[in-house]
Amino acid sequence: MDALSTDKGQVPEYFRYHQKTALLRTFLRHPMTRVGLPGLLIIAIAAVLGPLLVPYGADEPDLAAIFAVPSWSHWLGTDQLGRDLLARLLEGAQVSLSVAIIATLFATVLGCLYGFVAGMGPVWLDRIMMQFLDTLLSIPVLLLVIVAQAFGESSVLKVIAVIGLASWMGTARLMRTECRRLMAADYISAALVGGASQFRLAITHLLPNAAAPLLVVVTVGVGQAVLIESTLSFLNLGVPSTLPSWGNLLGNGMSSLLGGAWWMVLFPGLMIVFTVASINLVGDGLRDIVDPKRRAGL
Amino acid sequence: MLRYLALRFGSAIPQLLLISLLAFIVMKAAPGSPVASLVGGREFMSATDFERVAGNLGLNEPLYTQYLTWLSNVLTGNWGYSIKDGRAVSEVIWVATLNTGLLIGIAGTGIVLISLLMGYVAGRWAQSPVDYAVSGLAHISFATPAFWLALLFILLFSVELDWLPSSGMVTLGQPDTWHTRLLHLVLPVLTIILAHAGPYIRLVRGSVRDVLSSDYYRAAVARGLPRRILLWRYELPNALTPFITWCGVSLPLLVGGTFVVEWVFSWPGIGQLFLKSAIGKNYTVLMAAVLVTGVMVILGNLIADLLVAWLNPKIRRQYGRA
């Protein structure tokens, strides 16, 4: 995952004036974020404003235009009920992105708590918890998610919960490492001797220290959550099929595949790739900035 | 080395137990009583009969006894019968496992070869046009859902061009030759490789760059060692260790992706079985599929770790002399 490592001693240009410029500017100058950030902005704007601009509703059937090929009236074509694909894609952006973001936030809270307990608790507890984490990591996420989805009816809340429950492990491990690293620092010992409580330590020292790497994990996590959600919905195990999430649109496209309705498959997928790639690029940029080793140009 | 082996095998045991526990929970959480499914419904038997049969089946025992009995059954190959068609689960699972093994085996080999080659080229000639092309492709591959690529391939090669078959392992109604089997393999294998190679390529590129900028490598170049030795004794072995570790760690991802690809191409493997039984709520098969997948992944991880230990003199020494 080392896309941007450079030779030793040679400080890349976008880091060179780091001391003088704010971190934000360094971040904005990074070549990866230069591509990724505008992409994310476009997606966000499209998701928020798009449905207002498209003259069709996402659930508005038009029986006169069933399976319409992309044209000036329907930019991305229509589906088997004559619903405008562009309108559905933009509506779907809201569904897919909010599911992904909420699920990732849930996973982050869960992972932070787990990592905090493992990192601050006694060593034997840490051992057990980390062994459990390793075991969980050896099971395919998709498998867990599908098994969970096989029970009960599908609902948006359940999808969010399941994706969240399947993706907190990375955060937990990061948090635990940060805790252990921090507890070994002298100024923490000083604070402890001074009588600071664990809670106070967590708020004043741990969170600010862990915030930056956490941000990277969360960013990349949202992209992965988009992928999981789309896979689940594609398999009819995700959000209810009445909602136009990207995965549902693709699942719908698969059933019309042999009829040659290529636009129903092509565009939702492109949306997913564009979104996830933008998120990953921003995540890579963040990682380069956050990692002090890279920042020093090592 | 023996001590390392023992340690590593030891750590696989809790993993296997957790997987088996998960499978057991799947089976237990399934709605409907196994007694009722035996005779076709609760209403066909009296309450006393129901109790008696449940007792005979061991369903009144505490859960941990049930789990142990079930585990010993699983270990001796007694996996129960499919709710759907009454076939023995072990038989259904075995055929599917072989088919999946074939698919993952070929695709996995492809991923390893391609990512080693492309990652090496990109890392060695970093910041060249070739590097930008490879890295860009790797980025896109990382963000591409495998099932979408599968759909595009079907659209292009099966629907539009009609070159390659889009589903199954053999063509129905035609003789089953190795030629048609190969044709059926092309699209699924290609999909899995292209949708998964991204992170592998980026990893190889990164570690090749790390090796090239290390002091021991510069020293080796300065000593005037021939290219051949530099490549085979310095660059590859050092780039290989993180790569193999990653192969093991990422195995769950690859397996998950393969499952969905199997679903799209109707490949009669474990993934299709898994998804079908999840959607059709066929819990006995689902349980077995969870078990087999988990064991496959854990074994894969184990093999990767052992390979790393074998390749890496640090680990070899650390455990070898003790």
Image (tube, rainbow, N blue to C red):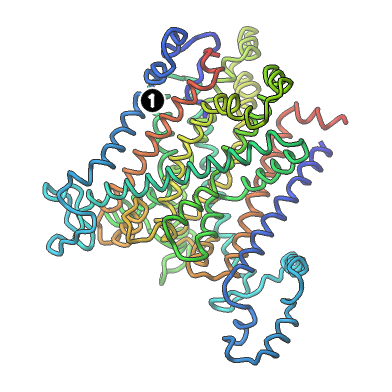
User: Relative to residue A246, is residue B216 depicted above or below?
Assistant: above
Q: Quadrant of residue B82?
A: bottom right
User: Relative to residue A263, is residue A206 depicted above or below?
Assistant: above
Instruction: For label 1, count other residues whose C-alpha is less than 10 Å away and answer few (under 14), some (14-19) or many (20+).
Output: many
Which residue corresponds to the image point at 44% horizontal and 55% vertical from the top-left? A157
Number of callouts in the render? 1
- Where does residue A227 sit, x and y in percent of width and height? 43, 46
Q: Quadrant of residue A292?
A: top right
Q: Of B266 and A100, which appears nearest the observer? A: A100
Which residue corresponds to the image point at 67% horizontal and 56% vertical from the top-left? B19
User: Relative to residue B76, is residue B109 depicted above or below?
Assistant: above
Viewed as shown, does residue B105 lie left or right of A285?
right
Parent chain of label 1: A
Q: Secondary structure at mark 1?
A: helix
In which quadrant of the rendered image does the C terminus of chain A lie?
top right
- Where does residue A60 sit, x and y in percent of width and height? 19, 59
| Residue B166 is at least partly visible in this image | yes
| Residue B190 is at least partly visible in this image | no
Viewed as shown, does residue B300 lie left or right of B260?
right
Label 1 belongs to which residue?
A33
Q: Residue furthest right?
A: B322
- Where does residue B281 sit, x and y in percent of width and height? 52, 69
- Give, as a three-letter code, the residue at label 1: Thr
User: Relative to residue B204, is residue A164 depicted above or below?
Assistant: below
Viewed as shown, does residue A50 lie left or right of B188?
left
- Where does residue B154 sit, x and y in percent of width and height? 35, 54
